[in-house]
Image (cartoon, rainbow, N blue to C red):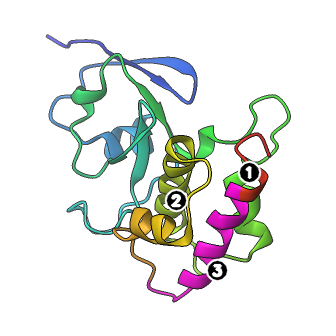
Amino acid sequence: MTTPFGFILNGSAVTLADVGRRTLLDVLRADCGLNGPKYGCGMAQCGACTVLVDDSPARACVLAAARVAGRRVTTLEGLADPVTGALHPVQRAFVEKQAAQCGYCLNGMVMTAVALLRREPAPDRARIRAALRDNLCRCGTHLEILDAVARAAEVGQDG
């Protein structure tokens, strides 16, 4: 017997067949066709899989999908304006400050920055650094990433 599973994904209700013991990352990528959250380490250590669950950052690679039943999940794809397609202010700031090289860490950096700026609209550089400390970037664009988050804070969430 399968148990239907439902949650709000990027503002839309989603109902899937029983997700069993699968991770949220697997459900998002395989069943929902989303590519923003990445599989990095599979141990919640790198941040590449970060999504927002009820506006808080969560590591989708270790989060059982069943735990988000009835909750709001936002992925990188859900940040852009659904009508115009305009990028979220954090996404725009990352482009403006050229804060990506290979882009693999970008999902986690952006999603963590969005959560930070929703909690603290005007963080100082130390708070930005502390919020992003558990997101790994192997390409070395850390300074540009910090600049991008600071820029997003300057323009605000409504950009």
Element class at badge 2: helix
Q: Is residue 115 left or right of residue 154?
A: left
Circle 1 packing at 10 Å, graded few (<14), some (14-19), many (20+), is: many
Looking at the image, which residue is at 64% across and 80% down?
A: 144
Find residue 137 and report its image quarter. bottom left
- Which of 129/8 is in front? 129
Distance in Å between CA atoms under marks 1 and 2? 14 Å
Distance in Å between CA atoms under marks 1 and 3? 15 Å
Find residue 39 and report its image quarter. bottom left
Q: Position of residue 87 (x, y in %)?
A: 76, 48
Distance in Å between CA atoms under marks 3 and 2? 15 Å
Q: Position of residue 83 (x, y in %)?
A: 82, 28
Amino acid type assigned to the residue bearing label 3 in the image: Glu
- Give the residues drawn in magenta, as a range: 138-153
Please report contact status of discs 1 and 3: CB closer than 8 Å, yes or no. no
Q: For mark 3, what is the residue? A: 144
Looking at the image, which residue is at 68% across and 56% down?
A: 153
Q: Specify whether residue 91 is in view.
A: yes
Q: Is residue 148 on the magenta stretch?
A: yes
First in sequence: mark 1 vs mark 3: 1
Q: For mark 1, what is the residue? A: 89
Element class at badge 1: helix
- Which of 123/9 is in front? 123
Looking at the image, which residue is at 61% across and 47% down?
A: 121
Q: Is residue 57 left or right of residue 75?
A: left
Q: Is residue 17 left or right of residue 86?
A: left
Is residue 99 placed above or below 88 in the rendered structure? Answer: below
Amino acid type assigned to the residue bearing label 2 in the image: Asn
Q: Is residue 27 on the magenta stretch?
A: no
Q: Name the image quarter holding the N terminus.
A: top left
